[in-house]
Amino acid sequence: MTEPNIKAVRLDERLIHGQGRLWISNLGVNLVIVANDEVAKSHIQQQLMSSLMPESVGIRFFSLQETIDKIFKASPRQTIFIIVKTAQDALTLAEGGVPIKELNVGNIHMKEGKTRLTNFIAVDADDLHALKTLHEKYHVDLNTRTTPLGNDVGSDFDLNDYVAKH
């Protein structure tokens, strides 16, 4: 089995939006996989996200299990950007064998019961458990860059250190 050419994996509750387009163009990928069970069933959400994509980039909306089942069938020519909605989604992919070396945690909305870590990231016990497991069991490097350049507020937050201590 050939290892898929995954350029990046990003956790963003908004999935594909304006900021997500920045990542796509900066990474130079030719395939985006939105890995989320809910979106895989929602043609309306798929249409909205597809409208934001450049024509030169393919997009697939897979359930988590479909992503696990299909990722190793990707052609070596496919340069892939995977976007997940939650930390649990990322963990499910890792548990299913998707090779995630690094996870960009770009946006987890603030809600009651969550602890704000940066302007764009707030975690509860479930988020923290998933991130900690990704980091400790699957050796995933976690970062908090909100843009590909990483020079924005919150980019220097050490999420690896935070999950190790909590």
Image (cartoon, helix red, strand yellow):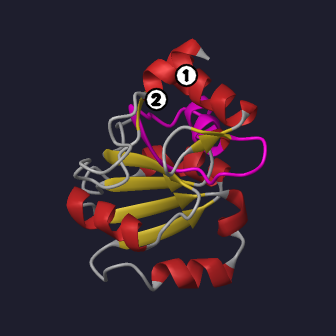
Tell me the amino acid under the disc marked 1: Val
Residue assigned mark 1 = 163
| Up/down of 152 relative to 125, above or below | below
In the rendered view, does 136 fall on the left or right side of 152? Answer: right
Q: Secondary structure at mark 1?
A: helix
> Which quadrant of the structure image shows residue 101?
top left
The residue carrying pointer 1 sits among few (fewer than 14), some (14 to 19) or many (20 or more) residues within 10 Å by Cα, namely some
Pointer 2 with pointer 1, Cβ within 8 A: yes
Report the magenta residues as a range. Answer: 89-114
Tell me the amino acid under the disc marked 2: Leu
Residue 159's disc is: 2
Give me the residue at 41% from left, 63% from top: 32
Instruction: Classify the position of the C terminus by image quarter.
Output: top right
Instruction: Classify the position of the N terminus by image quarter.
Output: top left
Residue 4: image location, x then y, percent: 36, 43
Q: Is residue 159 visible?
A: yes
Q: Name the one closer to the observer, 8 or 14.
A: 14
Residue 21: image location, x then y, percent: 35, 70
| Up/down of 151 relative to 54, above or below | above
The residue carrying pointer 2 sits among few (fewer than 14), some (14 to 19) or many (20 or more) residues within 10 Å by Cα, namely many
| Up/down of 80 relative to 138, above or below | below
Q: Cα distance, mark 2 to mark 1?
A: 6 Å
Q: Name the one closer to the observer, 59 or 19.
A: 19
**Magenta-span inclusion, residue 102:** yes
Residue 66: image location, x then y, percent: 62, 53
In the rendered view, does 129 fall on the left or right side of 84? Answer: right
